[in-house]
């Protein structure tokens, strides 16, 4: 029985450690994917101009008619799943003349934009004043502009406070300015061209969020960037499937160990069982004795295995998962591990208990 407890504990520890490490990896992956930017784009309903942003054509939009306003952002914060939205980043896009070239200017709220695009690397600083702007790497190279230079744009002097490091996206060719400044330069007060929404939490119902935003903004087209969502969901599903597969294999092995051990115990105690039956023990009594013993052993194995598994997960997390996210002590994992062990012990002991109950007492007593 001690060996059986140790065997079950090893199996439970393996499953618990795997589930804990996998859950930690899922959380770490979700945190990293949160840095990949928006997964929902909101643009006005129109068919005048094809809107392309970040290399992805999302919908048709017009910069002259049908634009949204800053008031529309407040509607996004009132949807039922608003708690799952981490960043709302409005933008106003427009073409301006700069250095003899026609360039794309994006008016943004820099605090939200920086939260949305955490992969940005800036040579210089992020804009903090209304007259400070940020240039993409290619645009700065073409115009021969460095951080600290000044720009003349429609009679206003703008200070280039920083230049984005090249990241291979459309951001490399854009002039980023304060949203209010861009609205004034383009003559579109309170107007915005699109809104980027980041909702990449671990269990975010993306489709439900898209539906609710569409209801709140009937004049807009809401599109989920399925590439980011699919990547996250497939990664999480693969990790979960792997953990469940290993858990099923370990559980099956544990059930076989219990079955063989309890069959051996029943065979070795035939005389004892025969004596019980001769003294008046019914078959139900014998079953309860065998199953009660198996459940007690399984409970001990489950508790010891859970503690050993959590300790193993904490010890091996840096080397196996290569993440810094701490292992979460989930009470549901403890209940699942101990409850699963009890089920495995009960399932593996059913046949031995039935066999012991059907043992003929006269046959057992003849071996005394």
Image (spheres, helix red, strand yellow):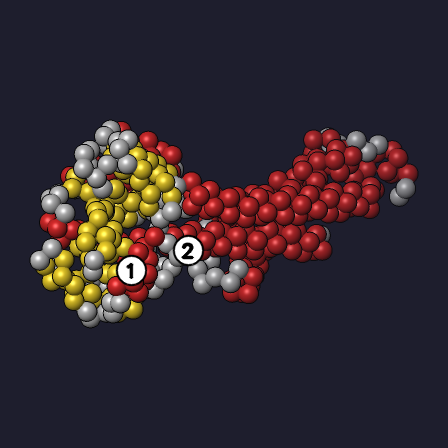
User: Would you say 1 lies left or right of 48 here?
Assistant: right
Q: Is residue 42 visible?
A: yes
> Looking at the image, which residue is at 87% across and 38% down?
365
User: Would you say 356 lies left or right of 205 here?
Assistant: right
**Residue wearing tag 2:** 32
> Looking at the image, which residue is at 60% across and 55% down?
13
Tag count: 2
The image quadrant that residue 114 belongs to is bottom left
The percent coordinates of residue 200 (x first, y second) are 37, 46
- Which of pointers 2 and 1 lies earlier in the amino acid sequence? 2
Mark 2 or mark 1, whichever is nearer to me: 1
User: Would you say 267 lies left or right of 161 here?
Assistant: right
Name the residue nearer the viewer: 309 or 37.
Answer: 37
**Residue wearing tag 1:** 139
- For label 1, the SS is helix
> Looking at the image, which residue is at 33% across and 43% down?
52
How far apart are the alpha carbons under marks 2 and 1?
29 Å
The image quadrant that residue 210 belongs to is top left
């Amino acid at each position: 029985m001690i060996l059986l407890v140790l065997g079950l504990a090893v199996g439970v520890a393996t499953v618990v450690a795997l589930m804990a490490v996998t859950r930690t990896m899922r959380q770490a992956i979700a945190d990293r994917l949160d840095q990949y930017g928006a997964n929902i784009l909101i643009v006005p309903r129109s068919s005048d101009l094809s809107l392309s942003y970040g290399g992805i054509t999302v919908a048709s939009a017009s910069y002259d008619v049908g634009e949204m306003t800053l008031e529309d952002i407040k509607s996004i914060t009132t949807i039922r799943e608003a708690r799952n939205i981490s960043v709302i980043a409005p933008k106003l896009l427009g073409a301006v003349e700069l250095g003899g070239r026609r360039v794309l200017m994006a008016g943004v709220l820099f605090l939200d934009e920086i939260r949305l695009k955490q992969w940005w690397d800036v040579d210089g600083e992020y804009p903090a004043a209304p007259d400070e702007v940020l240039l993409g790497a290619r645009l700065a190279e073409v115009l021969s502009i460095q951080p600290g230079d000044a720009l003349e744009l429609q009679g206003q002097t703008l200070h280039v406070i920083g230049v984005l490091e090249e990241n291979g996206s459309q951001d490399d060719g854009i002039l980023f300015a304060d949203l209010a400044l861009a609205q004034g330069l383009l003559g579109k007060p309170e107007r915005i061209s699109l809104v980027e929404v980041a909702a990449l939490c671990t269990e975010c119902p993306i489709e439900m969020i898209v539906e609710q935003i569409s209801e709140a903004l009937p004049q807009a087209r809401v599109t989920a960037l399925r590439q980011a969502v699919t990547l996250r969901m497939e990664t999480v599903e693969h990790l979960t499937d792997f953990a469940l597969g290993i858990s099923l294999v370990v559980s099956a092995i544990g059930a076989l160990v219990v079955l063989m051990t309890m069959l051996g115990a029943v065979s070795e105690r035939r005389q004892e069982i025969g004596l019980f039956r001769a003294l008046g023990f019914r078959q139900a009594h014998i079953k309860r004795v065998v199953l009660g013993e198996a459940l007690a052993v399984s409970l001990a194995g489950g508790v010891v295995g859970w503690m050993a598994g959590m300790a193993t997960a904490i010890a091996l997390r840096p080397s196996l998962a290569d993440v810094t996210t701490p292992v979460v002590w989930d009470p549901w994992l403890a209940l699942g591990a101990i409850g699963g062990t009890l089920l495995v012990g009960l399932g593996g002991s059913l046949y031995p208990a039935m066999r012991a109950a059907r043992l003929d007492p006269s046959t057992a007593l003849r071996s005394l």
